[in-house]
Amino acid sequence: MEKCNVCVGTEGGSIFELDVLKTGGNYADNISRAKKYDGLDDDYYRGIFVDHLFEDAEAKKYCKGEPCRNGMFSAKRYKETMFSSPRQEIHFEAKTRFSTLDQPILLKKNYIVKSNGITVQYILKNEGPIAVQGKFAVESNFAELNLLSPNYKPYSIEIVSGQDIVSGTSAARCHESVPGGLVPKASAVQITDSNSSVSFMFTPNEEAGVTYFPVAFKRRNMDTDILQNESRTFVAAFIWDVDLAAGMEIEKTINLTITQTRKRRK
């Protein structure tokens, strides 16, 4: 695109590289937690536009940043069903079996690239014989670049919730200030790296709940063998209620716009 390069892969059908050209930074340069170092395994790649389908109890754990079973689609290798370079589109799909009822669920996921951002369309279909209820979440992970710099500032997040704006930072968890860790009725989310003046604006086609939290990664120091903070990822996710009768489907769309403001001269 004009301002960045984006790489999309079949692992989770997600963005695994997002290079903002003027800063030279890859905001999708995430790693996953490993039990040996972090106490638990993520079992999926932390990209941008990672998909989960949770049962209610697991969704509550997720919103608190607690360990929970992966959300069915996040660890799947998606199948590419269409790619068009002239139209700047790529289509994926993945299937899973959901809940203790073992219901077959199909997720279609379409990327449409524009000059200043990306539109992602979702179609979630219940292919089973009985109704399915749960939570559909779309998670985006932003690597905190230059985290160890002495002048580093945490990323900021602003969420438009009804008539209010809820603010937070990548140094805190949503559930520390919001009951249940879920901001309701969100119509827009902006994440800003003030260190480089880059902003990521997400706008869904329908209001959703939003949660956010940091994930820290520890690794061994090569010289002393002591665990130390290696990097950190800022997680933000849209969450919708799902109530699908047999054979029914729902559609969701998220627009991502990437902007960079000029720094003022002192």
Image: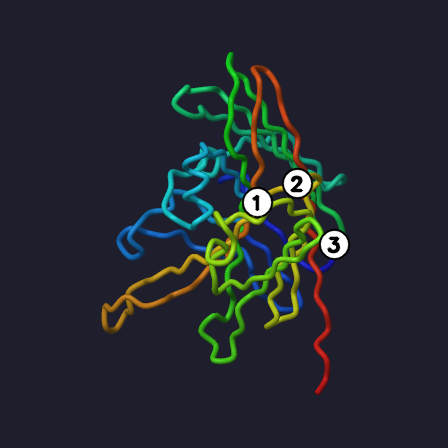
The amino acid sitting under disc 3 is: Asn
Q: Residue furthest bottom?
A: 266
The amino acid sitting under disc 1 is: Phe
Rendering colour mode? rainbow
The amino acid sitting under disc 2 is: Val
Q: Secondary structure at mark 1?
A: strand
The span from disc 3 to disc 1 (Cα, nearest Å) is 17 Å
Residue holding disc 1: 49
Residue 162 position within the rendered picture, expressed as x and y whole percent measured from the top left: 69, 49
Seen in the picture, residue 133 relative to 227 is either above or below; the reply is above
Residue holding disc 2: 120
Q: Residue at x 71, y 36 (%)?
A: 84
Q: Residue furthest left?
A: 225
Residue 83 position within the rendered picture, expressed as x and y whole percent measured from the top left: 66, 35
| Camera-side residue of 13 and 122 | 122
Disc 2 crowd, CA 10 A, few/some/many (<14, 14-19, 20+): some
Q: Residue at x 50, y 37 (%)?
A: 52
In the image, taking residue 104 as reference, residue 118 lies left or right, namely right
| Camera-side residue of 109 and 153 | 153
Q: Quadrant of the N terminus?
A: bottom right
Q: Residue at x 38, y 46 (%)?
A: 42
Disc 1 crowd, CA 10 A, few/some/many (<14, 14-19, 20+): many
Residue holding disc 3: 116
The reply to whether callout 1 and callout 2 are in contact (CB within 8 Å) is yes
